[in-house]
Amino acid sequence: MLAATAPTPTRKSLFVDSTPLLGDPVALRARAAKDGYLFFKKRLPAAEVLALRAELLAIIEKYGWRQPGQYALGGLIDYDAINRLTEEEMHRTDVGVTADAYHDVQRLESFHRLPHHPRLLEIYRALFDREVLVHPRHITRLITPHTCMVPTPPHQDFPYIQGSTKTWTCWFPVGDCPRALGGLTVLRGSHVHGYLPVQPAKGAGGFAVPLCPSETDWVEGDYETGDVLTFPSHTVHKALRCQFKDRVRLSLDVRYQPVDEPVDNSSLNPHCRLTWEEIYAGWKHDDLKYYWRKLPLKVSPWDHGYLQPKRRIC
C-alpha cells in the first residue's frame, strides 16, 4: 500500500451540457470516454415529467405523508407523519417509503413508459451505435425526511447490475432538484479504473467505494425539470445531503445497454416484491408488457464476489 498523503482539497465543478454533441456521435463518445458522464439540459419534456410527478405525489398523499394546502406539484412532507413510521415499516431505506407505497409506484404505467422516451433512446443509440436494451427494472426514489434515511454513499452501479460493463445508468429528478435537495454528483474520470472494491456502508445499496485522497473531482449541478444525467456502470457517484426536513426528492434510475451485450437476469425482474403480472394488471396498453422477451438476449450469471468487502489499495 502506498504511503498515506494529505487529502487533496475537493474540487466541485458544474455539469457540462452535452446536448450540442448529439449530432456528432464521435465527439459524444469521446466526451463520455474522458469524463465518465454526460449531462443533457431539459432533455425530457417538462410536461411528461411533471405528469409523473403528480402521480407520485398522489401516492404520497394517499398515505398521509404530504402536507395539506400546497399547490398541486408541491413536494412538502409532513415530517411528523412520515416519522411515525418505524424503520422496519419503511421497508427499503433506499427508496424512502413503505413497501405498499412503493408497490403503488411500480404499478404506474407512466413510470415504466417514460424511460422509453425517444429523446432518451436517441442518447444511447448515439453512444452505442447499435440497438438499445432498456432494462425493465426501473427504480424510483421518493426520498423523504424520515430519520432513517442516509444519503447514498460513493459507489459504482456495476456490482449491483453486473451483466455488461457497457450498461449506463440514467438518473433524472421528477421535478426541479437544486443541490440543497440532495441531487446526484459524479466523480469525473473515475470509470477508467474499472471495478473498485467495496466496504459496508449506510445508505442505498449497503456498500461504498473507499475513496483515495486524490479522488476529489466531483461534478454537480442544480437540476431543472427535464434534465438528465447519465454515466457508465464504473463511474463513482453519490447523493448530496438534503438540507431540508420538509421536502421529498423524487427521481428515477433507469439502465440502458447495447442489446447484444450480456444482461443479468435480475435486471429483467421488478424492483419490488410484485410480479410483472401484478404490475401490469391495471395498464391500458400492452406494447411494453414483456417487451424484452422478444429480444435475443444473452443472460449472464450473477457473481457474488463483486459485493464481498475488500480492501482498496490507493
Image (spheres, rainbow, N blue to C red):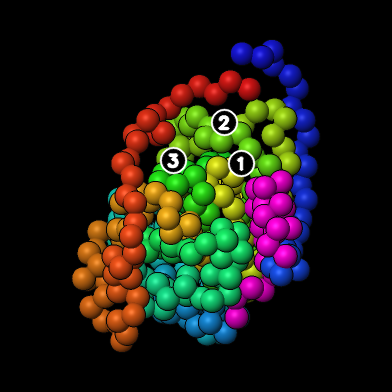
Cα distance, mark 2 to mark 1?
14 Å
Coordinates of residue 262 in the picture (x, y in percent): 39, 49
Residue 174 numbered mark, or none: none
Picture quadrant where residue 305 is located = top left
Residue at 58% across / 70% down in the picture?
Answer: 122
The answer to whether one can see residue 295 in this image is: yes
Q: Give SS at disc 2.
A: loop
Of labels 3 and 2, the one closer to you: 3
For disc 2, the marked residue is 210
Say which of 65 and 202 sits in front. Answer: 202
For disc 3, the marked residue is 159
Residue 191 numbered mark, or none: 1
Which badge, 3 or 2, comes first in the chain's sequence? 3
Coordinates of residue 53 in the picture (x, y in percent): 50, 77
Picture quadrant where residue 56 is located = bottom left
Q: Give SS at disc 3.
A: helix
Q: Give SS at disc 1.
A: helix
Number of residues whose C-alpha sits closer than 10 Å to that of mark 3, classed few (under 14), some (14–19) or many (20 or more): many
